[in-house]
Amino acid sequence: MQRTIKYILILFIAVSFTSCTDGASLQKYYVDNQEAKNFISQDFPLTMIEIDKSNFTKAQNDAYNSVKKINFLGYKANKTDNETLKTELAKVETILSNGKYNDLMEFNDKGNKVIVKYLGDEEIADEVIVFGNSKELGFGIVRVLGDDMNPSKMVTLIEVLQKSNIDESKVQDIMNFFK
């Protein structure tokens, strides 16, 4: 479980290196649920997360430096109320199935699904969205906001971040929420 939370957070941080747009529907979902029961919301600048960039390539460094802010919204699964989880998942999946969101990558890790999408074109992403869900834990959505984010550079950055050690104390509130 700890590995899954760490994996989602790494993806969250990685995706956070790619975004800035008006994602109205997703933004509305954030606003509508940021103080709702079983949800947690946190906004923070990328500088709050300490990451060792000493081995970054130029493309990874460019991607990292293009990220300015990360928005996180999480929903904690409740074993006695699976219907609400299904309803909330369906809402998010409907928003992200909108044609304005471009697929960047998708993968599964021990039954946990992670989808990375972006708003923009092949050269510049206005916003990068990382959506991860787990039947046991719930789900998390990360919006990465920044300037001149390049989707292909973001993929290389995500790959490096998956293997890196991130200071978990910087995102402890989120990790504790899912316990």
Image (cartoon, rainbow, N blue to C red):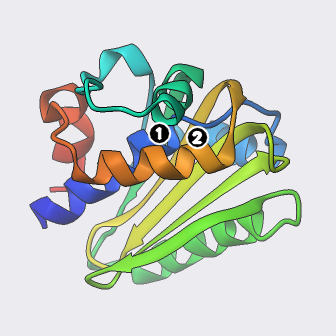
Residue at the spot of label 1: 72
Comes first in the chain, label 2 or label 1: 1
Q: Amino acid at mark 2?
A: Arg
Looking at this view, is 139 or 152 the one in front? 152
Residue at the spot of label 2: 143
Q: Residues within 10 Å of mark 1 (few under 14, many from 20)?
A: many
Height in image: 70 above or below 8? above
Please name the residue shown 25% across and 24% down the image.
Answer: 54
Q: Is residue 119 left or right of residue 173?
A: right
Q: Position of residue 106 (x, y in %)?
A: 53, 72
Q: Toward which corner of the image does residue 128 lie, by quadrant?
A: top right
Please name the residue shown 61% across and 37% down the image.
Answer: 18
Q: Amino acid at mark 1?
A: Phe
Tag 2–tag 1 contact (CB < 8 Å): yes
Q: Residues within 10 Å of mark 2 (few under 14, many from 20)?
A: many
Q: Position of residue 79 (x, y in %)?
A: 26, 78
Height in image: 119 above or below 101? above
